Image: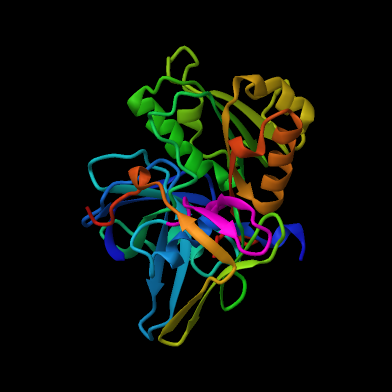
Amino acid sequence: MWRVGTVVALRDETATARTIAFEVQDWPGHLAGQHVDVRLTSPDGYSAVRSYSIAAAPNSERRVEITVERLPDGEVSPYLTRQVAVGDRLELRGPLGGWFVWRPEQSEPIQLVAGGSGIVPLMAMIRSYRTTRGATAFRLLYSVREPGAVYYRGELDAPASEVSAPKVTYAFTRAAPKGWPGRLGRIDAALVARTTWPSKLVPTCYVCGPTSFVESAAGLLVAAGNSPERIRTERFGPTGERQ
Amino acid sequence: MSKDDHLDGNAAAGPLSTIFAVDVTAAECQCAHCGAIDRFARTRLYMMGPGVVARCAVCEQVLLRLVRAGRRLLLEARGLTYLSLDTSQVQEPGS
């Protein structure tokens, strides 16, 4: 069922990523981790559909936010990140997906692992956790190319003294901030062992990113003793646009 | 098939919503070929072709195909023995 979303705000997250906030007519509400399909139709009737994770926490204001990474050869993302303006109306289908979700009643420790723009649905979980002050604790391991590519930096770097702040660990793969104490590189077994929840605490793990990243990260979590049953994954396609 | 060309069953939620009234990606399903039971969201999903193909994560046989041809939408699911939904976790559409 397609609904009409009116763009109510735009916010740049990085030089290439923009958050688009919609108010969606008759939106039934969503769960953290769900996604929407966005359909663009040209005057000649040609239409393109892409899936985007919802970044906003569940809310009662019918507000849906997506963060779109501009892909140089993308068919849809250049339009969404450059052309769309406040007041525009787009077609949205959702909320979609009932498996890759976090619900406030979950009481086990939560381990989030993001690769690049895979942070988006995990951010909805962090925001939902902050809103509801759930009875658990979140950890995030965020693999990202360079400091300038980090989404939601201000929110993620909120003071650790805040009760519901997740413990965030970055893995910079190409360039790190000045004075960065860690080493440059992909997530490996040592980083997983040092920064993720011990498997004996039986955390639920949510892993989101490009397919090769998810394969690798989920494999490391299993090697660290986590049961595959406790790992939920969401892969992005080779283009970063999921369809 | 390489490891890198598939998504998770999650990603079929949009296309499947054109046929099913509630989300079925969170449903448990059984593979008719090898008997494996898992969430549909954990199947291997291929979306590069003219439609959607879900394969068993264990034996890689086809569970379900959803293909659009012009104005016709075809769902073929003989690779699935059943879908089992937890109704307490189902979101009502449009409510």
Residue drawn 46% across the image and 12% down it: A161
Q: Position of residue A138 (x, y in %)?
A: 51, 25
| x 60%, y 25%: residue | A202
The reply to whether residue A187 is in sight is no
Q: In the image, is residue B20 above or below residue A185?
A: below
B89 sits left or right of A115 in the view = left
Given residues A103 and A82, the one toward you in this image is: A103
Q: Is residue A9 left or right of residue A186?
A: left
Residue A68 magenta: no
Picture quarter with the N terminus of chain A: bottom left
* Number of marks present in the image shown: 0
Q: Position of residue B41 (x, y in %)?
A: 54, 53
- Magenta extent: B24-41
Query: What colouring style does the render use?
Result: rainbow
Q: Position of residue B94 (x, y in %)?
A: 24, 56
Q: Identify whether A62 is placed above or below B22.
A: above
Q: Is residue B26 magenta?
A: yes
Q: Is residue B53 above or below residue A115?
A: below
Residue that extends furthest to the top in the rendered view of this protein: A161
**Residue A90 lies in what quarter of the image?**
bottom left
Rendered residue at 44%/36% (across/down) = A102
* Residue nearer the viewer, A195 or B10: B10
In the picture, the quarter occupied by the C terminus of chain A is: bottom right
Q: Quadrant of residue A162?
A: top left
The answer to whether A29 is drawn above or below residue A44 in the figure is above
Q: How far across and how far down the image is residue A153, in percent?
A: 51, 32
Left of B4 or right of it: where is B51?
left
Residue B14 can be seen, yes or no: yes
